[in-house]
Amino acid sequence: MSRTAVVRCLLAAVLFGATAPAASELAGSIPLFTLAGLLYVGAALAVLPSVIVRLPTRRSVAAEWRPAAVAVLAGGAIGPALLVAGLARTNAATASILLNTELAATVVLAAVLFREHLGRRLLTSAALITIAGGLLTWEPGAAVDFGAVFIIAACVFWGLDNGVTARIEHLSPEHVVAFKGVIAGGANLTIGLLASGWGSSTSVGDVISALVIGAAGYGISITLWVKGARELGAARGQVIFATAPFIGATIAWTVLGEHVAGLQVAAVVIAAAGVGVSLRSGHEHDHRHDPHEHDHEHLHEDDHHDHEHFDGFNGRHSHPHNHGAKVHAHPHVPDLHHRHDHNETSR
């Protein structure tokens, strides 16, 4: 399993976990749809320099516009809308617990819809982190109600977004984030302004803060997650990213000096164990690679990228490249090169 990919997903979780409390504070002064739009617009601004340097080609857009459209609609438009509808109909304690179902939705959809190989270890890992998430967010008064259906539905659409986004291989992660920010962010911001405006207590400082939080917690965070998930698969990438609430809790204890509850400490320990199990969830068997062309970040030491560069460059880089047919065996996870079917049960 790629250490770089794991670190990227962890950094994505750190950024999201660190900025989520700040975003929730802004929800008190900025209307929800307006805030959601500002966060995604901030995400687009974060990746704008990279997109300008390397604009998407017509060929890459033609190859990936369908999955990109699904990711934008499911993750950037429908998911947030369902969440807002759910938050308006249920209490905060219930909402916090139910948001943990995004991991379960991602894992189920990765296995059923996207045919990712999971194995017992990854399923155990996902179960541990889901249980830990419930313990971390548990508060008295949590109960399943009609609003819970909307929140669970939002998590399912985000799970679909995760699975689709991890499989996009001709557009860079920055391109994907830019599409989400411009299209979904612009749509949510327009809806918010038409429905609620800026809100009576929103200041210029609040707007700037929302853009900055969106740039870090959404723009940079999503970019890192997509890069990691391309090398790990959506399920494994989301398992690691699901540590965001635990990272946020740890920051609150160590930096903000908030009270540490025994149940919360137990949740962090269980989540850490879950991540540890997921890091050993690769498998090995004979498998075939068919001829294929795509564009993604890669190294030349992984036994899959044997093309040469005239200047001899051999570090991490991204460009369109071809793969020839190959049959071999080595430990692997369902990254962009290993999306084959499995008939056997493995760890």
Image: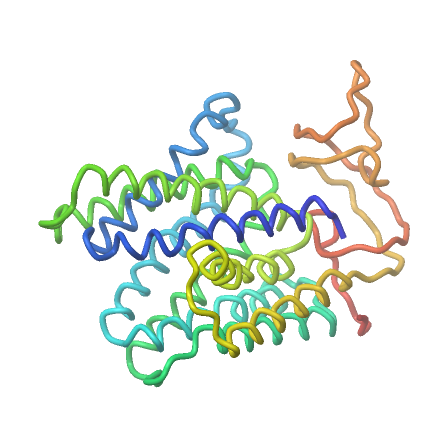
Left of 2 or right of it: where is 177? Answer: left
Left of 254 or right of it: where is 179? Answer: left
Seen at 54% across and 30% down, the residue is 59
Quadrant of res 75 = bottom left
Quadrant of res 146 = bottom left
Residue 5 appears at what percent x and percent y?
67, 47
- Given residues 20 and 109, the one toward you in this image is 20
Residue 249 appears at what percent x and percent y?
48, 63
Seen at 23% across and 56% down, the residue is 32
Does 208 appear above or below 68?
Answer: above
Residue 282 appears at what percent x and percent y?
78, 61
- Given residues 311 and 285, the one toward you in this image is 311
> What is the quadrant of the C terminus in the image?
bottom right
Of all residues shown, which one is farthest toward the left? Answer: 200
What colouring style does the render use?
Answer: rainbow
Does 80 appear above or below 274?
Answer: above
- Given residues 31 and 132, the one toward you in this image is 132
Residue 192 appears at what percent x and percent y?
19, 50
Query: How many marks on residues?
Result: 0
Does 53 appear above or below 255?
Answer: above
